[in-house]
């Protein structure tokens, strides 16, 4: 009998789904109870596990010190993650006044926590595999974890025996292990070092050999590096080994890069047989490169057999979707092979929070937004995550409430069902190779420009700039040389290309053939040819406090006129003026400082370009480092936020997204727009539901399925919930009026969909049906009697992207089926 019975064929299966769990659900060290817990977990998640080839269980045993401490004796007592809070502080566990927060003192998660040894852990691993195979019929892998921090279990190895390896100040002074640390001499007995640890042994080699021995003995199949381990020193912070918040220490780049690569090489010498999967840092590829010397390219291309890092959990922690999405896209623009993963945060077994129930408030924005992300490979193929990780199936008290899988699984499956099958309207050409070449070979003095570039895109996304498809610049060149059409319907967004680079030539060809491009950042390294193409010239830079003025309407509120351009945060000063103002060139925005002005957004649309356009946005990173982990954004009521120029420029190209709000301090919504089955899918997060969103695209105002909207000046307007995911197959050109778009029951044989549009007044309507449009037709009203139907003449449109039909001067209703 086929194991595919009942599976939705529109859901692309994952190669692997990982359920992450701690030992806390095993509240009794009893074999029957252990089997009961394993069965309960697999039963809960089996409706999702049907959609994968392999199931993995990532076991959060402790903090990785169980690897460092392992002696080879299965009777050795196991220190495991039985705590809520930080157990590695000066306060004893379960002691002190209750007002001490969990970062300064830990509690055991229950009274009389069970004791385990390494043999018990081996039994748990074996049972997970046996029960999992029985219930799911899948191959079951079990992974072990290594975390560099103090969060998950008590660690005498890190904080008493070998504090020299704790070089990072992530959660206080010397709180995190640094991957390229070296160990002091130790006479203790360890599984891979029975005669002790020699002085100066690299942590990579020691951890590798210990991992090889422990995973072989216990039955683990792979190792997970947690919280950025392996990717530099300060894996959560804006500052690092290179950037100290004031200066980029370029002279350290070669040494730090070597230390990081040596860690990976040494680890693989010690542990050659087991797969590595990674969590990565909280930041992006470019920021990690500039602030901490992380050569992600060499790690990816080296002989290390790793899975690239997924999206970070920042959106769960503080709603910073810009950082999550930009970081995710930057790290998957190039990958070691064809595999990458999406990770979703449902429970936290350590810090007394369950994001699905509290931080997210049972809203699915952190499912739909990152699952709208896709990457384009060098063959021009849209590729989706091959792996899905769920952190974790148990909460901080060892409970596994049915409510969470029951509510989360439908959203994950819907997001996968409607995942992108074409490039999105906006595509990020990420300069993965260029950033690495400049940092280590060509011009390390441009680290601040690399640092700025990713922060600027982060800020643009947080302002609502809908970018969620990524391709590397190398991938773009490959696609263009192979004459791929994958990008023909998209606006490309990238940094100003290097003088004489192949990407420069391909971008100009793309525009000349009718494509649209937005380039951002400093133009000082551009060629004369490219500057002429943009119709701009370089002049003396200005910076500091400047007045900004926009040359057309933007949002439906008055923007601040003061912009703070900090050259140290923005890759230098503002250095551009329009060369020769011609009819094909428009200055969209400029800044002035007393009598001196510079142009910060310029759009050129030559009549020779077959509808093509190119826009230059200088870009200001409106943020600075004031302590903590991340940059702090400039005060919004006082300052214009530089990242919003990207959404403004996009509107001038034709994709206009505007906001209306009563107070400038209200946060703007986040937008992702993807395509599936010839339709558009809009996904969003609304931090403040008092903010109204307005849309108008080249083909008209988008009408979301199942909604009503008041059209104002040709824009559709919506107040959306916190989390939303809406299909759009109808665009309307109509100035005013209330229109609605709803699903109707087909009530007709061999008809899959019927959609009704109401409230039309002399409207031009464009319909994007599904790809299977064999039985497509349009009617002026909903009539269930085929012999009485009035069928409208349907004309295929050609002026805008996609496959669509258009209808002119429609009043009243329009009903379409296919």
Image (tube, helix red, strand yellow):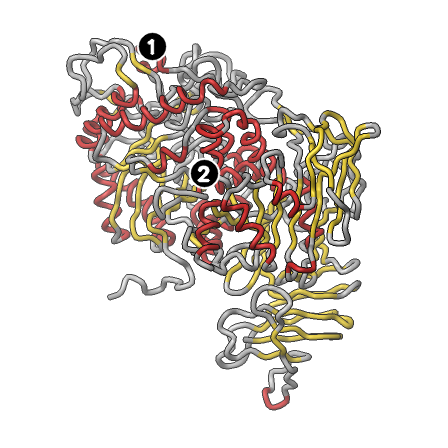
Q: Say which mark, if any, is on residue 587.
A: none
Among the two numbered marks 1 and 2 on one chain, the one whose residue lies closer to the N terminus: 1
| Horizontal relation, residue 154 to residue 732: left or right | left
Look at the image and tell me in which quarter the N terminus lies.
Answer: bottom left
Determine whether, in the image, residue 332 is placed left or right of residue 696. left
Q: Which residue is mark 1?
A: 160
Is 332 placed left or right of 266 in the picture?
Answer: right
Image quarter of the C terminus: bottom right
Residue 667 in picture, x, y percent from top left:
68, 38
Vertical arrangement, residue 385 with respect to residue 286, above or below: below
- Residue that lies at the very extreme toward the right in this rendered image: 595
Q: Label 2: few (<14), some or many (≥20) within 10 Å?
A: some
- How far apart are the alpha carbons under marks 1 and 2? 42 Å
Q: Residue at x 50, y 37 (%)?
A: 327
Determine which quarter of the picture holds residue 71: top left
Query: From this viewpoint, is residue 260 visible?
Result: yes
What numbered label is drawn on residue 433? 2
The residue nearer to you, when weighing 370 against 252, is 252
* Residue 601 % position (x, y): 71, 42
Rendering coords of residue 628 (x, y %): 56, 21
Residue 752 horizontal/vertical position (percent): 51, 73
Quarter assignment of residue 148: top left
Q: Residues within 10 Å of mark 1 (few under 14, many from 20)?
A: few
**Marks 1, 2: nearer the viewer:** 2
Q: Is residue 524 above or below residue 188?
A: below
């Amino acid at each position: 009998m086929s194991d595919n019975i009942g599976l939705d064929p529109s859901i692309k299966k994952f190669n692997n789904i990982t359920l992450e769990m701690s030992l806390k659900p095993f509240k009794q060290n009893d074999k029957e109870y252990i089997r009961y817990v394993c069965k309960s977990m697999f039963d809960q998640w089996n409706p999702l596990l049907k959609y994968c080839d392999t199931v993995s269980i990532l076991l959060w045993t402790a903090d990785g010190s169980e690897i460092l401490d392992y002696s080879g004796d299965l009777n050795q007592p196991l220190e495991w993650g039985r705590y809520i809070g930080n157990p590695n502080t000066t306060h004893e566990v379960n002691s002190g006044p209750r007002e001490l927060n969990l970062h300064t003192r830990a509690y055991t998660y229950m009274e009389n926590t069970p004791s385990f040894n390494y043999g018990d852990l081996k039994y748990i691993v074996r049972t997970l595999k046996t029960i999992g195979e029985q219930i799911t019929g899948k191959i079951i892998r079990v992974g072990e974890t290594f975390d560099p921090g103090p969060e998950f279990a008590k660690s005498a190895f890190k904080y008493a025996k070998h504090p020299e390896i704790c070089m990072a100040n992530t959660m206080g002074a010397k709180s995190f292990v640094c991957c390229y640390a070296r160990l002091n001499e130790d006479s203790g007995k360890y599984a891979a070092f029975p005669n002790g640890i020699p002085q100066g042994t690299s942590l990579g080699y020691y951890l590798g050999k210990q991992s090889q021995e422990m995973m072989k003995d216990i039955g683990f199949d792979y190792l997970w590096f947690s919280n950025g381990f392996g990717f530099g020193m300060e894996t959560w912070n804006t500052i690092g080994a290179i950037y100290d918040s004031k200066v980029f220490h370029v002279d350290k780049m070669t040494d730090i890069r070597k230390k990081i690569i040596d860690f990976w090489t040494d680890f693989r010498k010690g542990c050659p047989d087991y797969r590595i999967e990674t969590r990565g840092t909280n930041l992006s590829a470019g920021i990690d490169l500039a602030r901490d010397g992380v050569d992600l390219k060499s790690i990816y291309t080296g002989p290390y057999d790793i899975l690239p890092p997924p999206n970070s959990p920042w959106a769960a922690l503080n709603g910073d979707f810009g950082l999550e999405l930009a970081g995710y896209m930057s790290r998957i623009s190039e990958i070691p092979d064809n595999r990458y993963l999406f990770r979703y945060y449902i429970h936290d077994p350590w810090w007394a929070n369950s994001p699905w129930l509290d931080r997210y408030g049972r809203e699915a924005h952190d499912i739909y937004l990152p699952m709208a992300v896709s990457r384009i490979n060098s063959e021009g193929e849209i590729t989706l995550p091959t792996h899905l990780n769920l952190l974790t199936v148990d909460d901080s008290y060892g409970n596994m409430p049915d409510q969470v899988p029951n509510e989360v699984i439908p959203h994950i499956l819907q997001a996968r069902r409607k995942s992108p099958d074409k490039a999105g309207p906006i595509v990020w050409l990420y300069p993965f190779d260029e950033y690495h070449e400049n940092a280590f070979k060509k011009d390390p003095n441009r680290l601040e420009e690399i640092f700025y570039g990713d922060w600027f895109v982060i800020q643009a996304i947080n302002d609502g700039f809908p970018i969620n498809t990524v391709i590397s610049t190398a991938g773009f060149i490959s696609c263009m040389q192979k004459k791929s059409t994958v990008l023909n319907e998209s606006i490309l967004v990238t940094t100003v290309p290097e003088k004489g680079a192949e990407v420069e030539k391909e971008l100009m060809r793309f525009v000349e053939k009718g494509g649209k491009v937005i380039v951002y950042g400093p133009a000082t390294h551009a060629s004369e040819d490219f500057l002429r193409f943009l119709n701009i010239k370089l002049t003396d830079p200005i910076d500091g406090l400047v007045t900004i003025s926009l040359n057309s309407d933007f949002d439906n509120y008055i923007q601040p006129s003061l912009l703070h351009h900090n050259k140290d945060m923005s890759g230098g000063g503002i250095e551009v003026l329009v060369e020769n103002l011609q009819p094909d060139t428009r200055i969209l925005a400029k800044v002035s400082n007393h009598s001196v002005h510079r142009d910060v957004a310029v759009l050129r649309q030559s009549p020779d370009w077959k509808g093509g356009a190119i826009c230059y946005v200088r870009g200001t990173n409106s943020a600075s480092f004031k302590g903590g982990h991340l940059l702090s954004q400039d005060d919004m009521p006082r300052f214009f936020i530089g990242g919003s120029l990207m959404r403004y420029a996009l509107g001038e190209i034709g994709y206009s997204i505007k906001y209306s709000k009563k107070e400038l301090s209200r946060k703007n919504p986040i937008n992702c727009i993807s395509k599936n089955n010839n339709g558009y899918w809009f996904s969003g997060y609304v931090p403040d539901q008092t903010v109204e969103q307005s849309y108008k695209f080249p083909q008209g105002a988008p009408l979301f399925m199942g909604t009503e909207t008041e059209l104002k000046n040709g824009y559709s307007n919506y107040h959306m919930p916190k989390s939303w995911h809406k299909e759009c197959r109808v665009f309307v050109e109509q100035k005013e009026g209330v229109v609605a778009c709803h699903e109707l029951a087909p009530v007709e044989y061999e008809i899959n969909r019927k959609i009704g549009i109401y409230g039309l007044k002399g409207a031009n309507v464009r319909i994007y049906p599904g790809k299977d449009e064999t039985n497509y037709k349009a009617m002026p009203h909903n009539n269930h009697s085929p012999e009485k139907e009035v069928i409208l003449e349907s004309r295929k449109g050609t002026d805008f992207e996609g496959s669509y039909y258009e209808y002119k001067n429609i009043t009243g209703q329009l009903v379409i089926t296919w």
